[in-house]
Amino acid sequence: MAGRALLFLDVDGTLLPSDGEMLDAKLVDWQEWQSHRNPRLARVDRAHGGRLLSLDCDLVWATAWMHDANEVIAPLLGLAPLPVADLPEAPLEDPVDALHWKTAALVAAAGGRRFVWLDDEISDIDSVWVGAHHEGAALLHRVDPTLGLTEADLTVVGDWMGSAE
């Protein structure tokens, strides 16, 4: 399917590095976490906004933050509000050796368009499933959650965008 590629963008562990700290979803006050009071917001690399905008793609939030990403994260990156992928409710615990809770929803949202998915929780299971269920080209790129999104990650995406046309 023609058209610009989509870039599905996660927040926790991707734009918001963990620096090795584990996030226990059962103990987090999500309303507090997904707000301007989040203590990890200082870790967001504000230069990523311009770099993401320079990619030849349409940016879409793909995060449990949902619309809160437009209120809290987008301004830090200098981004206008972005579309938000329609995702199912995030589980409190991610099952091991199972399809990620976002995968099927992102393939549906792509509707056959080329897409990149940047997330710290992508596994080989997701890559295989997308390969079997998505008509277009797709790059599922796992970001190291301790570092968050890096220039090297963005270079991989930029190179893929240039070669997948």
Image: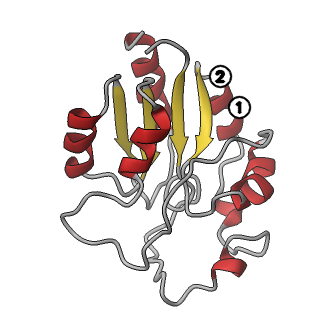
Residue at the location (72% across, 46% down)?
Answer: 46
Which three-letter amino acid code belongs to the residue tagged 2? Answer: Ser
Residue, x 53% and y 60% (percent of image)? 17
Identity, as a three-letter code, of the amino acid under mark 1: Gly
Marks 2/1 in contact by CB < 8 Å: the verdict is: yes
User: Where is 99 relative to 84, above or below?
Assistant: below
Q: Position of residue 13 (x, y in %)?
A: 49, 60
The answer to whether 104 appears left or right of 25 in the picture is left
Judging depth in this view, the residue of 122 and 129 nearest the camera is 129
> Which of the numbered marks, if any, corresponds to residue 50?
1
Quadrant housing residue 93: bottom left
Q: Residue 138: x, y in percent?
A: 35, 29
The residue carrying mark 2 is 54
Q: Quadrant of the C terminus?
A: top left
> Is 88 in front, or is 58?
88
Q: Which of 82 and 146 lies nearest the eye of the viewer? A: 82
Q: Quadrant of residue 69?
A: bottom right
Q: Residues within 10 Å of mark 2 (few under 14, many from 20)?
A: few
44 sits to left or right of 142: right
Is 53 left, or right, of 93 in this rendering? right
